[in-house]
Amino acid sequence: MTDDRYTARSLHHPGEHTKAFVFSAALYRPFVACMVPVMIGALLAMLQGQGALHFLYAGCPLALAVSAVWTTIQVRREPVEIHVRDGAVGVRTLMGAAAPSESISWFRLLDVRNRGDDIEILVGYDMYIVRRRHWTEFDVLSERLRRTLDRDGRELRR
């Protein structure tokens, strides 16, 4: 059996950055999006001659909490590193690839589906969306995944 290992990294791969850096870098957009309604509410209150401080006192912590939950989900779902070897696939998410402390968990590739410029991969119990614009070697990765599925997934489709 040949050693046919392949590793692909996303443009969003954190490299040597820590988990705290990755989380804080990913937090700013959701936080801004959650603060827009708070700021609009405060502006409207000020324009009507009412106090705006209650919008800020209640809205800022609420916006931070919602954006932190949103960011936590996103950094744990976005694949940034995909390893392919003899019939098994290992995926590291954005948070998992930031200063990884654990070894890669290998799972069987169950399905690969086209979605326009993206592909969906079903690895173990998890489904990941691999977006072409995030991967410089998208075509090579897609071909490797399809070859792994064709070679090792025949008995699953019966």
Image: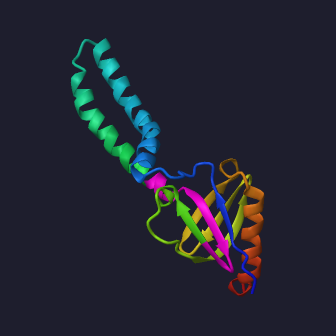
* Mark count: 0
Q: From the viewer's perspective, is residue 133 above or below residue 61? A: below
Q: Residue at x 22, y 23 (%)?
A: 53
What x and y, as percent, mark residue 146?
Answer: 75, 70
Q: Is residue 80 magenta?
A: yes
The part of the chain drawn in magenta is 73-89
- Kindly give the residue lying farthest to the front in the view shown: 16
Locate residue 140: give its quadrant. bottom right
Report whether 153 appears left or right of 60.
right
**Which residue appears at 72% of the width and 79% of the height?**
3
Decide: is 48 above or below 76: above
**Front one among 88 and 16:** 16
Residue at 34% from the left image edge and 38% from the top image edge: 63
Residue 158 occupies which quadrant of the picture? bottom right
Q: Is residue 142 magenta?
A: no
**Residue 104 left/right relative to 5:** left
* Scheme of colours in the image: rainbow
Query: Depth check: 104 or 60 in front?
Result: 104
Image quarter (top left, top right, bottom left or bottom right) of the N terminus = bottom right
Task: Determine whether 47 is above or below 124 in the image.
Answer: above
Q: Is residue 74 left or right of residue 5?
A: left
Q: Residue at x 63, y 49 (%)?
A: 11
Q: Position of residue 99 (x, y in %)?
A: 46, 58
